[in-house]
Image (tube, rainbow, N blue to C red):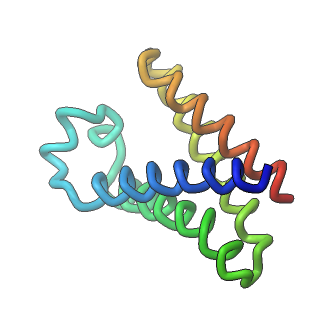
Amino acid sequence: MNTTLWIIQGILATVFALSGSIILLAPKAKLETKLSWVKKYSDGMRYFICTSKIAGAIGLILPMYLNILPILTPIAAVGIATIMALAMLYHFRHKEYKDVPATIIFFVLSVIVAYNRF
């Protein structure tokens, strides 16, 4: 089970670190054509969301790997689950149903990590 959790954590960390970095570093004009939420939120909110994703990705791996405050790993998983729950709410409110399955998958994976690591 430990190996399975590490694989899930690796997948989640990779996805969230990459998506957070890409959205953080890409020009806003380019993002607005692909991501509808970028138009609706301020740059500050975009930076907050992206840094939260990156911090969550780091928190999923480093604390447990380095054995320094390993309790931070399940806390990071809860944070990512929260981000995904809010993303689902956003997609439902804006009738973007094609984006919901991915958020559900990442939400479930985050909950699995949080539950088993606590």
Q: Is residue 52 left or right of residue 1?
A: left
Where's residue 61, x and y in %?
60, 67
Q: Where is residue 95 in the image (x, y as percent from the top left)?
A: 44, 15
The image shows residue 108, relative to residue 96, as above or below, that is below
Name the foreground residue: 56 vs 43. 56
Farthest residue toward the right?
118
For the residue pair 5 and 88, the one nearer the viewer reads as: 5
Label total for image: 0
Can you give x and y, in whole percent of width and height, for residue 45 in the image? Answer: 41, 55
96 to the left or right of 39? right
Task: Using the rendered view, name the quadrant where residue 103 is placed.
Answer: top right
User: In the figure, 17 relative to 19: above or below?
Assistant: below
**Which residue is rendered at x = 58% and y = 40% of the image?**
84
Left or right for 59, reference 27: right
Does 1 appear above or below 56?
above
- The answer to which image quadrant residue 107 occupies is top right
Q: Which quadrant of the figure contains the C terminus?
A: bottom right
**What residue do we see at 54% from left, 68% from top?**
58
Residue lying at 60% horizontally and 74% vertically, measured from the top left: 62
Residue ID at (68%, 35%): 108
Nearest the viewer among 108 and 8 is 8
Q: Where is residue 69 in the image (x, y as percent from the top left)?
A: 76, 80
Q: In this view, does 47 lie to the left or right of 25?
A: right
